[in-house]
Structure formats: C-alpha cells, structure tokens
C-alpha cells in the first residue's frame, strides 16, 4: 500500500452543499441560544437566506464541469440544474412551512406527545408556536438532496440518502392535527425507508464485488470504475444484475415507483401538508437525479439489460398510480397517487438514453415540482374548525364559496391532466418525444393510455368544486398569509409560464444535459 | 391589404374581448352582453374583409404568418388558411354573434355569473378560430385540446338537466381522442425530422406501418370529435344538456374540427394509409347515417333529436371525404358550412321553443303552431333545410356528395341515399308532433307560449334563413373558394376524378 494522499477539494464547487449543511448546524445552535419567541423568525430567515446563498453559488458555478473530493462528487450540468431546481422548490416549500397566519400556532406540533385541542395545544395556539426544529431538519434534508444528485460514487450516494431521509422521517411525525395518522405515517416511512436503504447498501456491496479483478484497476464503487467493470469485469454477471436490482429498489423507493410505492399515500396523507409538498417536489427531484446518474453514467453500458425491467416498472407505476387515483376520496391521497403516476412518466424519460431524454426529464422534474407545491399550498388553505378538510366530498361547491382559489386549483389540475398551455403538457411532451425517438413506443403508448385514466380523478375534483352545490359542510378557504400566497403564486405562474413559453428553461436543461464521467 | 396578419389578429381578438367581458362587474350583465356582441361583430367585420382579400385563384395557403414559439422543438405560431379553413372561419364569425344574441337571457336562469358566460363564448371563439387557422401541427393540437375547457364549463355550469354528467363525458371523450392524437403528433414529429410545420411534414416519406399507426392516432381523435359511429355517444348527451347557443356552436362548428382535421391532416399527411383505411371509414360513415337517423326518429327530447340528426349528417360528410373525388370532397366541405347554418338554426329555434315551454320533451308540445305561428314556421323551415330539401343550401352539398360518391362507389351512394328518406321521417314527424295537430291544452296555460318571436329573435334567425336560401340557389361564391383547396387535397393523395361515366358506359358497351 502506498501512503494515503488527501484528495483535492474544490470548495467553491461544493459551496451550495456546504452552505446548506452549515446553515443547518447554525440552526441547531439557534435552537439552543435564541429566546423561544424569536426563534421562528430567526430560523425561517436563516433557512431562506441559506437557500438563496446556495442558489447564488449554483448560479456562479454554472460553468463548472468537474469531479472533486477524490471521485466522490461530480459537479456538472445535471448536478447544477437539479441542485438549482431543488433549491428553488425548497424555498417555496419553506415559505409554506413557515406560514403561521393560516392557523394560529402553525401546522407543526411543539412536542411529539401533545394531542390536538389539549391544554398544551391551546397554549401553543395562544402564541407559543410550534417547534422550530423543523427548519434545521428541512435544511439538513435539502443539504442531503444536494449531495444526492451530485454523488459520483455509491457510498457517497448512500450517505446522502440517509442525510436527507432521516430528517424527512421526523418531519412526517410533526403534524399538529391528526397526530396518530402523522405518527403512523412517520413510522411507516421510517420502517420501509430503512429496508430500502438496506437493499441499497447490499447492492453497493455486490457491485463492489463485481468491480474487483479488472486488470489495472482497483475495485471501487465510483461510477467510472463501475462503468469500466460493466464492460470488462471477469466476475459473474449475476453479481452485476443482483447489485443493479438492489440499488434500483433503494432508489425507486424514494422515487415512489410501483411496486415500491405503498408508503406514498399514507405518508403523503399523514405528514403535515407543507412537508408533503416538500417531499413531493424536492424528494422527487433528488431521487430521479440519482437514478439518472446511476443508470446513465455507471450502468450506461448495461442499458440493454436494465431497460426492459425498468420499462415494466414504469408501466406498472403509471398503471397503479392512474387506476388507484380514480378510487380516492381524499385529496392528499389523490395527489399521492398522481405523484406515483408522474414517477412513471419520469421513468419514461429516464429510459430515453439521449441528451433530449435527459433534458426532458430534468425539465419535467422542475415543472412538476412547481405545480405540486402549488397544489399542496391550496390544500393547506381549504379548512374548517378541525384543520384541513381533505375529504373530497367536503370540496363540493368550493367554486361558489371561493372562486379564486377554486380557479387556481382547477388550473393546476388541468396542468396535471396535461392540457396544453400548462407545464403539464410541455413536460409530458419533453419526456415522450425523446422516448419515441429512441424507439420506446410502447412506453409512450402506456403513458398516453394512463393519462386518459388519470384525467378522470382530476376532472372529478373540478366537477366537485364547480358543478356541485355547496353543502352545509363545505369548508371555507382561509385567507392565506403572505408566505403561502407567495408560494402559491410562484407555483401557478411557473406552471403557466412553463406551459406557454418553456423555451428558456428547456434551453437551460439542454445546455446542462451532459454528465461528466 | 393581404399583408395584414388577419389570422393571428382574428385568433387573439376574441380572447382580448373575453378578458374585457370577464372583468366587467357581475352586477352589470347587460353591459357584458353588449360588449360581447359588439366584439363578435368586430370579428365578423374583420373576417369579411379577409374573405374579400382572399384570392380565389391564388396560392393554396394564404395569409401565412409564422413566429417562433419553442425553438427547441421546432414549434412555431404558424397560421395559414386554405379555402376550406376560410369558409369555416367565416362560418364561425357568422354564428358567434348570432349565438350571443340568441343566448341573451340563457345565463340568467342559472344563478351563475352572466359576464363569465359571454366571456366563455368568446374564449371558445378564439380557440375555434385558432384551430382552423393553425398551420403548425403542434399549434393545432394546442387549440384542439384547449377548446375543451370553455365548452366544458359552458355545458357544466350553464347547461340543463344532467349537465355534470354530460360535461364530464364530453371532456373525457375528447381528451381520450386528443391523447391518441398526442401520441401520433409526437410520432409524426420524430419521423418528420423534429418539425411541426404542415408543409414540411406533407413532404415527408413515412414507412407503411408507421404511416398507418399515425393515421389511426389522428383519425380516432377526429372520429370522436366529429363524431362518427361508434364514438358518437357523447354528442346527444352534450348537445342535450348544453344551453341552446352553446349547443349550436358545439354541433355547428366544434364538431367540424373533426372532419376538417381529416381533410387537412389525415389525407395529405398520410395519403397511402388514408386509401388503405378508406373502406373502413366509409363503412363507419354509412352505419352512422342509418343508425343515427333511426335513433333520431325515436327521440322524445328535441335537443337530443337534433344531435342525432347531426351524427347522421356527419356520416354524409364522411362519405364525401373518403369517396376521394373532387365533387364529393367539395360537397363534404360545403356540407360542413351548410350543416353549420342549418343545424345551428335548428338548435337556436328549438332553444327558443324550449325556453318558452320550459321543457325539451316533444310530448310536452303539440299544436304549438296555433300559439306561435312564426316560430313554428321557422322550425319547419329549419327542419326542411336539415333534410336537404331542394332550394335550401344543404341540398346542394348532399347532392354533390352523393353524385361524387356514385361515380366511384355505387353501393355506398345508394345506401347513403336511404338516409335522406329517414331524414324526412325524423324531421317531419318531429315537426308534426310539436307544432301541428291538436293543441296541447297544457301549452295555453304557459305565458311564454303566447309570445311569438320578438325582434331580437327575428334578428337572430333572419341572417341564417337568408344564407340558407341564397346558398341553396347560388352556392358559387363558396364553392369557388372550396374547390381549389379540395382539388389540392385530392392531388395530395394522388386521386384523380374518374372520366365522365357516359364515356365509360359507351366503351363498355362497345366491348
């Protein structure tokens, strides 16, 4: 063994990650030293400032195409595009999380043991406010996601996976209303997430074994080595296939693809709605960012082997999401199944191994994130005395009571349904076009057919809101505070602009659509 | 003058009008109506100017404009009109002001915002003009889909009995068709070298298998839209539930997008597949003619009856298109215009009857002609136009379709002719049961039934009646515009008209 050498580290290229993780640590200190009544403002500003600073660094780094920290982190076009996307969407999610005007005391509980409407809870509503640990947790999660999309070896990727997953498990348990549902969701997410992580880790081990024995190279789990091993390794291909399958399970779990999707509806329903929005937008970007890198960089040469399997997963995901969405009666569960179906459409993009396919998938991720955050922002507003009214029957006649918010939500649903002049249509085109050009006609046909099915549940909500008479129990729409209003407007405007004039973002995505290897 | 960007201005103008109307206060419904009506007249004037500027013997596509939209995918805002599109644009421009005038009081009965109703009508006009004016396949698709949204809310919010069901069914059927077309549009884009320009795409050579699939994708969308049997079941529901004005636009114009799409996209872009599928399409059209006519005879709901007659008429248009002769093609396009006028009139008149009676059921009428003689007379006239009586405009087109089809395919023409007999049955029987015979005593107790046509309604009806009569005797101005475009379409698919049949008979006799 020769002596160990310190890897050179390009701190500027890593700056967005370092800023987020640093801000999270400062957030922990803030919890300890800032008086309770000031913490909310301080924490929220800290988190938002950190996101802005990280975003600035991403923009400044936008020409970087390098691999740093040994071969652990790749800062290239897709990394920067997806990091930018995660940060913008995270800023919107933070606005939703920081909202306290809609409900006195905010959407988050002060201690895990408090039940709704108890004396403790009333004290919180009277001004004590919910936990502010939420912000460092979210900031840690964002930091983990930034690493996840940049990771250039499987171990870094695993650590990033844990860094952003653990805070998410906790965040899910913090809903102030419907405590049991929230805790159940968190536990479910944690248990299944832990299994998925274990699968991932086992996959890493198998792949490591597969890479050993190539002449002139030492074994390793960085993507260049794996890529070389796929072409030249003398080891049994069984190791490769088993490893790929286990890795895929871990990643597809986070991406909420069938058959690894079962946690999604429960967790989406139980988690505090702003956190659900955060997961639906940012986790999806991170998970697909990693999927793209693993399958386009590390296993690119094995695409003949994984495409049929992933293709079946994609079709299954679209089918499950679309068909089960039809039967839902809860708006959050409906959006959860719709997000599963969207994971299927994204997989179609992942399976188009071309520059256009990559840029289309990245465009889809960001466009979908904007719409889904706006959708959950509306969900936080439709409420009655018991908190959010998520049962669909309660939305009947909402269009009469609050035409503005019903119009906004209708627009978002039309976007989900893929009606032109919304980002939903352009992003579908962005993934289906390249997939068809690469000869994946069967995936496109499946996508189109499931879109038809999926249009029905969306339309049902529109019918509920506009064409049904308001009942006794139709909730009112709360006047949004400035933060929610800002997040909602950003989401809706982005959905419209990306539908009418998608060219600038498409240009950006196309310019970024090349991995460094 | 021909450099004026007619088509883009025509498309955008109603949208601007819709915004203006939508922003008017809800408390001032009359102002909203006046602004909407004025705006639609403005569009009409502009369309007339465009009609005059169109050079009959000029290029196939005129008023071409093109602006880049999404350069990454080669999408442009390309507008261009041939003769077929021009007559359809004219039909829209004529119908919309009349529909607005006819719907003057429709929205008031529904408790919902009156300005929004008229704004939706103008949005619908924008999308309808856009869909006929587009010469970029992507742009066409965008208008084709967006068109659903205003119509959905017109039916769902302002419609009658079972409006929710009808609105959702309409939307889902159209969306399903649209998504099939989306797959085909993407496919066309891929094989056509990533361009959406119609003219570039019509030059592309496509392999036989791919061509058939792409044809099918487009054809299903258009067949649902038109609608052809067996994709027709949404139309009676939607037509029955929609407010009369919206129903007139739905059947008069919106459904023509289907037949127009077949003529503009299916035939020129996939000529070989079109020829291969033609027997099947003809069969569907023939089934539609007979089956829908039989169902129409059995209807007891006036608006559903008119909807079924339309499905039968679309069968005739289908026969005209897939006969692949210039006469039949010209007849089909002329039929699209005349059907818009005749059925539009029929829907509006039926709407006036229903508004007076408060019921759409034929059995609730009977002898209404004794109370409202002028209205009953107009209904009779509209019915006769609908069954293509000689002297009315639809006769010309139906006749052209039949003789055009007869020269190439006699059985088809013969079966289609049966439809005329059934048409007489459903129209005359409907007229007899509503306005003739002994007076239904229940009618005399309704105040509305004692009021005959007022001035507003006469203004709505007069232009349509005049157009139907004039075009019945002198269709030349319209056929002159249509003919070159149809001829060019037939050239695209490489079909020439058979030589006059007299000559063939002599030759055959000589053998």
Image (cartoon, rainbow, N blue to C red):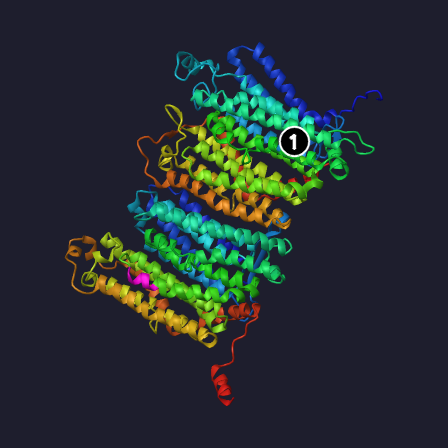
Q: Is residue A153 visible?
A: yes
Where is residue A377 drawn, in percent x and y?
Answer: 48, 30
Q: Is residue A29 left or right of residue A121?
A: right
Residue ID at (37%, 39%): A464
Q: Is residue A109 left or right of residue B76?
A: left
Q: Is residue A14 left or right of residue A110?
A: right
| A453 to B206, vertically: above or below | above
| B135 to A511, vertically: above or below | below
Residue bearing mark 1: A149
Q: Is residue A80 visible?
A: no
Residue ID at (63%, 19%): A23
Where is residue A374 drawn, in percent x and y?
Answer: 50, 33
Which chain contains the residue that carries disc 1?
A: A
Residue B295 highlighted magenta (yes or no): yes
Q: Nearer the viewer, residue B142 or B214?
A: B214
Are there few (<14), some (14-19), or many (20+) residues within 10 Å of tag 1?
Answer: many
Q: Nearer the viewer, residue B173 or B42?
A: B173
| B447 to A67, vertically: above or below | below
Q: Quadrant of residue A147?
A: top right
Q: Is residue A63 left or right of residue A263?
A: right
Query: The N terminus of chain A appears in which quarter of the rendering?
Result: top right
Query: The C terminus of chain A appears in which quarter of the rendering?
Result: top right
What is the magenta range? B293-298
């Amino acid at each position: 063994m020769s002596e160990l050498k310190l890897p050179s580290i390009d701190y500027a290229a890593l700056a967005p990650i370092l800023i987020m993780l640093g801000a999270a640590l400062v957030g922990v200190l803030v919890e300890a030293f800032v008086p309770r009544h000031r913490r909310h403002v301080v924490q929220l500003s800290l988190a938002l400032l950190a996101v802005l600073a990280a975003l600035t660094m991403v923009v400044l780094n936008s020409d970087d195409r390098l691999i740093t920290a040994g071969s652990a982190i790749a800062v290239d076009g897709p990394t920067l595009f997806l990091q930018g996307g995660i940060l913008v969407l995270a800023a919107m999610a933070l606005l939703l999380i920081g909202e306290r005007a809609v409900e006195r005391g905010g959407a988050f509980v002060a201690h895990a043991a408090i039940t709704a409407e108890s004396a403790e809870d009333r004290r919180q509503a009277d001004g004590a406010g919910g936990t502010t640990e939420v912000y460092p947790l979210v900031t840690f999660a964002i930091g983990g996601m930034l690493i996840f999309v940049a990771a250039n070896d499987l171990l870094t990727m695993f650590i990033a996976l844990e860094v952003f997953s653990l805070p998410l498990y906790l965040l899910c348990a913090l809903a102030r209303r419907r405590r049991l549902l929230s805790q159940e969701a968190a536990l479910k997410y944690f248990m299944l997430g832990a299994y998925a992580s274990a699968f991932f880790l086992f996959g890493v081990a198998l792949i490591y074994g597969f890479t050993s024995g190539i002449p002139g190279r030492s074994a390793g789990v960085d993507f260049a080595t794996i890529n070389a091993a796929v072409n030249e390794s003398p080891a049994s291909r069984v190791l490769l296939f088993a490893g790929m399958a286990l890795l895929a399970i871990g990643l597809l779990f986070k991406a909420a693809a069938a058959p690894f999707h079962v946690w999604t509806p429960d967790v989406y329903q139980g988690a505090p709605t702003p956190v659900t929005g955060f997961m639906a937008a940012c986790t999806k970007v991170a998970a697909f960012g990693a999927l793209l890198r693993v399958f386009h960089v590390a296993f690119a040469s094995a695409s003949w082997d994984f495409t049929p399997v992933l293709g079946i997963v994609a079709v299954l995901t679209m089918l499950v999401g679309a068909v089960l969405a039809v039967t839902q009666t809860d708006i959050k569960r409906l959006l959860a199944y719709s997000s599963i179906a969207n994971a299927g459409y994204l997989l179609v993009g992942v399976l188009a191994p071309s520059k256009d396919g990559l840029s289309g998938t990245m465009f889809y991720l960001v466009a979908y994130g904007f719409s889904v955050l706006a959708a959950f922002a509306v969900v936080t507003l439709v409420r009655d005395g018991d908190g959010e009214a998520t049962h669909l029957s309660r939305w009947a006649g909402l269009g009469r009571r609050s035409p503005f918010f019903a119009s906004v939500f209708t627009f978002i649903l039309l976007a989900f349904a893929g009606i032109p002049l919304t980002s939903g249509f352009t992003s579908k085109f962005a993934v289906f076009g390249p997939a068809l050009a690469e000869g994946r006609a069967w995936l496109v046909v499946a996508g189109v057919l499931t879109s038809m099915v999926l249009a029905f549940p969306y339309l049902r909500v529109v019918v509920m809101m506009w064409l049904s008479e308001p009942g006794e129990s139709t909730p009112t729409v709360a006047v949004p505070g400035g933060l929610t209003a800002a997040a909602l407007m950003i989401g809706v405007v982005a959905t419209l602009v990306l539908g009418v004039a998608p060219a600038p973002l498409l240009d950006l995505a196309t310019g970024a659509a090349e991995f460094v290897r | 003058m021909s450099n004026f960007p007619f088509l883009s201005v025509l498309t955008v103008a109603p949208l601007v009008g819709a915004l203006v109307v939508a922003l008017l206060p809800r408390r001032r419904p009359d102002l909203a109506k006046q602004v909407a009506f004025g705006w639609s007249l403005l569009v009409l004037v502009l369309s007339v100017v465009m009609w005059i500027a169109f050079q009959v013997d000029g290029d196939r596509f005129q008023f071409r404009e093109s602006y880049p939209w999404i350069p990454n995918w080669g999408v442009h805002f390309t507008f261009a009109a041939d003769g077929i599109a021009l007559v359809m644009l004219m039909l829209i421009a004529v119908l919309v002001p009349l529909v607005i005038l006819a719907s003057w009081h429709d929205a008031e009965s529904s408790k919902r915002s009156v300005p929004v109703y008229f704004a939706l009508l103008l949005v619908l006009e924008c999308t309808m003009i856009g869909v006929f004016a587009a010469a970029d396949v992507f742009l066409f698709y965008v208008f084709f889909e967006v068109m659903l949204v205003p119509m959905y809310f017109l039916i769902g919010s302002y419609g009658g009995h079972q409006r929710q069901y009808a609105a959702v069914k309409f939307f889902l059927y159209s969306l399903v068709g649209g998504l099939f077309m989306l797959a085909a549009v993407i496919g066309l884009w891929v094989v056509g070298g990533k361009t959406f320009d119609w003219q570039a795409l019509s030059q592309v050579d496509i392999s036989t298998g791919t061509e058939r699939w792409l044809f099918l994708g487009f054809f299903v969308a258009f067949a649902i839209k038109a609608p052809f049997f067996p994709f027709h079941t949404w139309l009676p529901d939607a037509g029955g539930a929609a407010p009369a004005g919206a129903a007139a636009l739905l059947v008069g114009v919106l459904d023509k997008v289907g037949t127009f799409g077949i003529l503009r996209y299916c035939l020129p872009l996939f000529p070989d597949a079109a020829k291969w599928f033609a027997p099947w399409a003809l069969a569907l059209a023939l089934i539609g003619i007979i089956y829908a006519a039989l169902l129409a005879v059995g209807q007891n709901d006036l608006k559903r009856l008119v909807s079924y007659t339309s499905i039968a008429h679309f069968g005739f248009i289908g026969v005209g298109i897939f006969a692949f002769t210039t006469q039949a093609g010209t007849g089909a396009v002329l039929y699209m215009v005349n059907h818009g006028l005749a059925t539009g009139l029929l829907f509006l008149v039926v709407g006036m009857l229903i508004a007076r009676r408060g019921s759409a059921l034929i059995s609730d009428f009977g002898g209404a002609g004794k109370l409202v003689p002028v209205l009953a007379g107009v209904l009779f006239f509209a019915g006769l136009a609908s069954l293509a009586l000689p002297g009315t405009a639809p006769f010309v087109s139906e006749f052209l379709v039949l003789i055009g089809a007869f020269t190439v395919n006699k059985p088809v023409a013969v079966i289609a002719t049966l439809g005329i007999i059934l048409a007489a049955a459903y129209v005359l029987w409907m007229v007899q049961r509503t306005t003739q015979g002994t007076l239904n005593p229940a009618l005399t107790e309704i105040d509305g039934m004692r009021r005959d046509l007022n001035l507003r309604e006469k203004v709505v009806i007069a232009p349509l009646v005049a157009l139907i009569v004039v075009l019945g005797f002198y269709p030349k101005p319209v056929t002159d515009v249509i003919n070159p475009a149809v001829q060019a379409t037939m050239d695209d698919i490489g079909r020439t008209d058979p030589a006059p049949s007299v000559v063939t008979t002599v030759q055959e006799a000589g053998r």
